Image (spheres, rainbow, N blue to C red):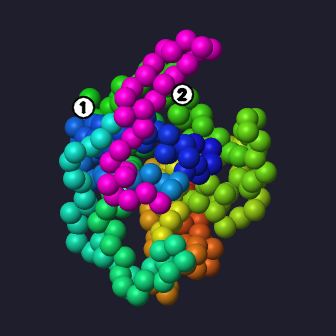
């Protein structure tokens, strides 16, 4: 949670399985979500319906195990406009046709912020939308969502504070002041930059939630690694965060 970790996501995907992962979120009211594939490899739609058997050991003693799982249901996004761009790179080949995103992972902004709210303020969301977590679990999540790379002891990271804090500081290299805490998760793929954050400043007595996404793919080619993340996306999200922050500070003074 401190940094972006595709392998970490994939281990969770393997443990939960595609069917349980999706349908549990839907039952909790987060219906505009589709978790259809791993992030760290190039498996097919069908291959991603399988998840491997898992065994947990304590020394040589097996303390938990579950069999291989297969989701026999077909999920897709069922949204308009999921055919995007004019070309995409597959392997080393440029395919001269739009990319079909109907079987890619999807999270609506409303659901992203709803889940963040359920983690930060579980008592403020309907009971059915809360997660089955203990207080220690919530504190664990909040600790690592707000942790900066330089604050992490294991493993050690040599990264800027702003690497995974796009709002307010994403276009800066300076350290984030101690009075500001950002509890967030970012996304970066296919020209999209996303930040989903709860931001507090204890000195100024302000707090707010902010979720935003921007698309930066001027040439409309996917997977060519030519996106305007740092030219357009990061400055936009950073400035958006500063505008909302300044608005909250001014409102506090009134």
Q: Residues within 10 Å of mark 1 (few under 14, many from 20)?
A: few
The percent position of residue 73, horizontal first and vertical second, equals 20, 47
The answer to whether residue 203 is above or below residue 192 is above
Magenta span has 75? no
The residue depicted at 60 percent of the width and 14 percent of the height is 60
Q: Position of residue 167 (x, y in %)?
A: 57, 59
Residue at (23, 66) in percent of width and height: 79
Point out which mark residue 128 bears.
Answer: 1
Q: Residue at x 37, y 51 (%)?
A: 48
Residue 165 place in picture, x, y as percent = 61, 55
Q: Residue at x 60, y 37 (%)?
A: 144
Check if residue 59 falls in the magenta segment: yes
Say which quarter of the image contains residue 24: top left
Horizontally, is 204 left or right of 36 in the view? Answer: right
Q: Which residues are magenta?
A: 42-68
Q: Residue furthest top?
A: 61
How far apart are labels 2 and 1 at the CA level? 20 Å
Q: Secondary structure at mark 2?
A: helix
Residue 244 screen position, x and y as percent: 51, 60
Q: Is residue 210 visible?
A: no
Q: Tag 1 or tag 2, which sits nearer the N-term?
A: 1
| Near-viewer residue (130 or 43) | 43
The residue indicated by pointer 2 is 139
Q: Secondary structure at mark 1?
A: helix
Vertical comparison of 73 with 212: above or below: above
Q: Is residue 93 something that shows in the picture?
A: yes
């Amino acid at each position: 949670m401190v940094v972006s970790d595709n392998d970490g996501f994939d281990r969770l995907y393997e443990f939960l399985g595609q069917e349980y992962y999706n349908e549990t979120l839907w039952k909790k009211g987060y219906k505009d979500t589709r978790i259809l594939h791993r992030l760290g490899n190039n498996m097919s739609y069908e291959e991603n319906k399988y998840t491997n058997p898992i065994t947990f050991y304590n020394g040589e003693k097996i303390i938990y195990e579950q069999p291989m799982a297969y989701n026999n249901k077909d999920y897709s996004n069922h949204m308009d406009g999921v055919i995007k761009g004019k070309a995409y790179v597959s392997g080393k080949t440029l395919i001269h046709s739009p990319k079909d995103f109907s079987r890619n992972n999807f999270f609506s902004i409303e659901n992203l912020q709803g889940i963040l709210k359920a983690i930060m303020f579980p008592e403020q969301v309907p009971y059915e939308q809360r997660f089955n977590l203990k207080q220690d679990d919530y504190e664990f999540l909040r600790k690592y969502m707000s942790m900066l790379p330089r604050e992490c002891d294991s493993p050690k990271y040599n990264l800027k504070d702003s690497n995974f804090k796009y709002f307010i500081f994403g276009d800066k290299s300076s350290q984030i002041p101690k009075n500001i805490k950002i509890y967030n998760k970012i996304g970066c793929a296919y020209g999209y930059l996303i930040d989903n954050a709860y931001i507090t400043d204890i000195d100024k007595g302000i707090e707010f939630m902010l979720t935003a996404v921007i698309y930066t793919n001027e040439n409309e080619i996917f997977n060519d690694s030519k996106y305007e993340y740092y030219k357009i996306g990061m400055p936009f999200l950073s400035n958006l965060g500063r505008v909302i922050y300044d608005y909250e500070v001014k409102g506090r003074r009134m």
